[in-house]
Every structure is written in C-alpha cells, then in structure tokens.
C-alpha cells in the first residue's frame, strides 16, 4: 500500500477504533472470536490488503437472531416518536463522523472523496426523514356498511428484518432500510457485502455507541459472511419476516424463491440497465452533462448508472463527437486526489468483466468511439482501473441487454420517439430511465403508460442518483419492491383492518339471522 494510503488507513483506524483484525459479528456486543472464515478487506485503489475480518458462522447467526428478536420485543414497548429519537441521535453522530466514514468508504470501495462523504450524507438525510416519519405513521378510516360500527386500518411492526447490501453503496442502502424499519418498530440483521466489510463495521461501531450511551434496546445486528452461507440462512429463516436484498439478478432469484417458499416478504434491488433518450429538442449542454455524469460516476458501478443512450438522428453526429471529447478529457485515477471523477473498479473480476463486455460488443457489431482498455495510473503500482468507454451499436444485441458493472456506455440512434421508447424498453431490467427534451408532448409520452417501463423516470436529468424522499426501486428483472421515501415504510409493517362494534347488536354477514 502506498505511503499516503497507509497514512490514511492509520488515521481512520485510530479515529473509528478499528484494528488490523476485527470481529465481523455484533449482537449487543462484539463477538471476540466468531467461528467463520477470515475475510480480507482489499482497497481497489492499489489492490493492497487493508485488514482481516473474522466472519460469522451458522452458530453465530443463530445467536444473533435470538438476541435481536429479544431486543425487538423490548423495542415494541417504545412509541414511534421514542424510536425516532434514537434515529435522531444516530443521525447527529453520523454528522460528527461524516469525514472519517467517508474516508473508509473511499478507501474500501474506490469512491471519490466527494462520493464517499456523499454516501454518509445520504445516511444523515434518511435519518432526518425517519425522525419525521416516526410522528406520521398512519392508517385510514373507512365507512362501515354496518350501523354503529367503525372500521380503520393500522400498521403494526413486522418483526425481524434482514438487510443484505452490495459494495457500491455499502452503508446508505442499509440505512434506507434500517432507519425506516426501526421507527416502524422492527429490529434489523445486516449482512454486508464481503467487499465492503470495514465500512459496515465502522458504521455499526458508531450506531451501537449511541445505543449503549442512551440505553436503548440493541435492535441492530451485524454478521459478515458469504452469501452462500449467511445469505441463505437469512433467506430461509421464518423468524426474519422480510429480506431486503441488493445484488445481481442471478442471486436475487435465489433469494426470492427461498423467501417465497416460506411466504416471507422481499425487497429486491437487482439489475439496472438504465437508458436515456436524447431528443433533438433537448438542451444539448445539459444532456451531455447528464449523460456523462450518469455513465461515469462511481466508475459505472451504480445500479442507476446510465448504460445506454438513444440519440435522435438529427443531432447524433454532434452529440457523439462532443461526448467523445468529454470521455477523452475525463480524469481517471486515485479517487483520493482532487479533480478525479472516475476511480477504480472494485476488483480484478470487475476488470475482466469490463474487457469481456467490450470484446462482445465489438463481435456483435459495435464500433468503439472512446476508451475500451484497462488503465495504468501514475503513482500507483496496483489497483483496478479502466478507461470510460463509449460503443456505438447498430441495434439492440445480447450484450446491451446485460448489466456490466463498469463505465461502458452503448449508443443507439433513432428517428421517431416511438422507436426510441421501443429500444429503451427492449432490455429485461427496469430500474431508472430518463429523457432529455424541452418538448412537452415528448416528455408526457415518455412518462405515460406507453413510455418508460422503469420504476424511476427522469426528465432532463441523469438516471444516476435518487432523492431519499421518493420510493426507490424498479420493475421487471430489477426485482420489485421499494425502499427509502414516500410510503415505502409500509412494507416493514403488517397491515391490519380493524372493525369496532360500539352498538348493542351484531349485524351478521350476508343478511344471516341468528338469535341466542
């Protein structure tokens, strides 16, 4: 590890109370000697080891579930506003530790400094949202058809929640689920990605410090381990009422089938092969900025990354020429350095997937417009870097229907909006979408039932990114379910219809008469 990264590692380890070897199991206390395998945290910035983690096993998982179930029973004795107070205190502590946590995210996942701190800011924002929500959990009252009866709905805590997160948003997605579920009245078991384990441990240290200092029930638990073992245990366990899973479509199918067999609930955030339509009636500068950022931010490793653009024939040549210039000028390198937009991919396998996708696109008729190769970064002997890549495609092909977690942008051309929408909707995924246009009719058609088939639709802004106030999620192979804002909180609760008879008689169903 280079000297500046070694110094950074030492600083944040001291600030966050980390060690070279850390326990990856927490349930009311850190388990000193988990019985799982060792997992190594590697920095994609230079490919060097950061720390070793002791993962959990089946026995550790059983202990965690029992302890967290008990904590959830105690949690039920608090009112929603009292639960919200804990989340408020956690949000305040995250504010104090934002810079340190952002450094950990950057060191472990390769995000730029700005994106690393932005990840923690999302946690702070969702904490604020959850605090407000804790005083707004509501049902509706309905008119009863029976005399002297009242009928209404209420939402009660679901129970124990399992959250399985991916490396690309290693802490914010956990908070989307956990903070909302907590104010509803649930406890949470978290299995983070094995590629972002230090981030998870750091977050848990901060969160549990607040819990202990304020004597709240230990409703948040952590277990690091493989998806094949811990992930499958969580999915199959009927005590865990809901599994929120972020990951690949392939793994998501396994989770969905396993949870469905026991009639549990799922939130699935899977593939996102996101497309943007660029109309001749768009602001070209705005469109270029939105497309370039959407395609290259986080080195193309966002579930909302722009992976396909469909450009109108009239502006195709000008747009692609200017886009190539942007890609040629963009800075790729150490994400800790100022001015860098594109950092490393997460590991060597990601680089191999990038290379395979570029080769396949060429075989399927693609023409390379920019990038297409791995990159060597001055001052770094290791790391996993590639050139942001633009490939012109003659039509929708198999590779363009797949999600490659890398900065590859496929470009198509169109003559009519109907043709553009057809190309856009031709992929199996359905997470995020956008159109760049100043034409009201084009905008409205894109947003109609004949337009985008995605869970997120944007006009004159990038596919990448989403505000926490809106429900986040997608359709088709993206899996289904919603997280974060709006009324997504309802999935963490069980819905109950209540009928109260305040009269002196019982009107029976279907006009049945029965005397006693």
Image: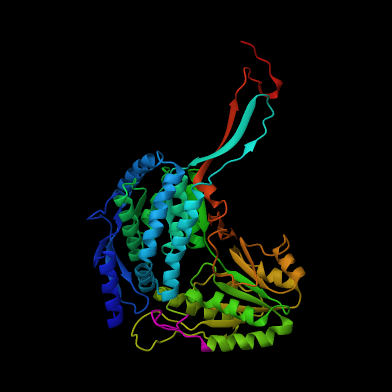
Dividing the picture into quarters, in which one does residue 464 lie? bottom right
In this view, the residue in front, 132 or 495, is 132
Q: Is residue 478 magenta?
A: no
Q: Quadrant of the C terminus?
A: top right
Question: Can you give x and y, in whole percent of width and height, for residue 69 in the image?
Answer: 36, 42
321 relative to 192 in the view: left or right: right
Residue 280: x and y in percent read 73, 80
Residue 294 screen position, x and y as percent: 56, 74
Label the magenta part by its dominant secondary structure: loop
Residue at screen point 57% across, 51% down: 487
Point out the image quarter for the N terminus: bottom left
| Magenta segment | 329-341
Q: Is residue 421 above or below residue 92?
A: below
Taking the image as shown, residue 22 lies to the left or right of residue 234, namely left
Colouring of the image: rainbow
Is 372 placed above or below 348 here? below
- Of residues 202 and 138, the one nearer the viewer is 138
Q: Is residue 311 left or right of residue 235?
A: right
Relative vertical location of residue 222 with respect to residue 369 in this rendering, above or below: above
The image quarter in which residue 13 lies: bottom left
339 in magenta? yes
At a point 45% along the width and 48% down the height, the residue shown is 183
């Amino acid at each position: 590890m280079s000297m500046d990264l070694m110094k950074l590692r030492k600083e944040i380890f001291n600030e966050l109370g980390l060690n070279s070897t850390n326990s990856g199991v927490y349930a009311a206390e850190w388990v000193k000697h988990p019985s799982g395998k060792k997992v190594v945290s590697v920095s994609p910035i230079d490919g060097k080891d950061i720390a070793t983690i002791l993962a959990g096993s089946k026995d550790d998982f059983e202990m965690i579930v029992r302890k967290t179930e008990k904590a959830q029973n105690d949690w039920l004795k608090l009112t929603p506003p009292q639960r919200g107070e804990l989340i408020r205190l956690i949000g305040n502590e995250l504010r104090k530790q934002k810079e340190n946590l952002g450094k950990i995210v950057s060191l472990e996942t390769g995000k730029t400094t700005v994106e690393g701190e932005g990840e923690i800011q999302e946690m702070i924002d969702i904490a604020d949202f959850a605090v407000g929500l804790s005083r707004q959990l509501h049902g509706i009252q309905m008119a009863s058809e029976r005399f002297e009866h009242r009928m209404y709905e209420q939402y009660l805590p679901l129970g124990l929640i399992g959250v399985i997160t991916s490396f690309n948003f290693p802490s914010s997605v956990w908070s989307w689920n956990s903070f909302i579920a907590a104010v509803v009245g649930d406890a949470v078991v978290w299995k983070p990605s094995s590629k972002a384990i230090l981030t998870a441990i750091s977050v848990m240290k901060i969160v549990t410090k607040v819990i202990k200092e304020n004597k709240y029930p230990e409703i948040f638990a952590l277990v690091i381990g493989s998806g094949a073992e811990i992930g499958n245990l969580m999915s199959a366990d009927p005590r865990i009422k809901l599994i929120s899973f972020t990951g690949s479509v392939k793994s998501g199918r396994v989770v969905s089938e396993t949870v469905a067999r026991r009639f549990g609930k799922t939130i699935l955030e899977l593939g996102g092969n996101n497309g943007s339509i660029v109309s001749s009636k768009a602001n070209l500068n705005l469109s270029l900025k939105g497309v370039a950022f959407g395609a290259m931010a986080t080195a193309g490793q966002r579930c909302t990354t722009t992976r396909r653009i469909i450009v109108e024939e009239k502006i195709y040549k000008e747009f692609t020429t200017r886009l190539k210039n942007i890609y040629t000028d963009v800075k790729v390198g150490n994400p800790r350095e100022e001015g860098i937009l594109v950092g490393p991919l997460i590991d060597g396998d990601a680089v191999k997937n990038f290379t395979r996708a570029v080769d396949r696109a060429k075989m399927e008729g693609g023409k390379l417009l920019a990038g297409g190769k791995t990159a060597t970064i001055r001052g770094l002997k290791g790391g996993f870097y590639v050139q942001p890549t633009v490939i012109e495609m003659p039509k929708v092909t198999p590779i363009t229907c797949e999600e490659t977690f890398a900065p590859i942008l496929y470009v198509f051309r169109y003559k009519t909006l109907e043709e553009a929408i057809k190309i856009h909707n031709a992929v199996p995924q359905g997470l995020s979408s956008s159109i760049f246009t100043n034409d009201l009719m084009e905008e409205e058609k894109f947003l109609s039932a004949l337009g985008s088939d995605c869970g997120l639709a944007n006009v004159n802004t990038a596919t990448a990114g989403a505000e926490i106030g809106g429900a986040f999620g997608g359709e088709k192979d993206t899996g289904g379910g919603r997280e974060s804002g709006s009324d997504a909180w309802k999935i963490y609760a069980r819905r109950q219809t209540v009928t109260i008879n305040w009269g002196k008689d019982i009107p029976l169903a279907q006009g049945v008469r029965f005397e006693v």
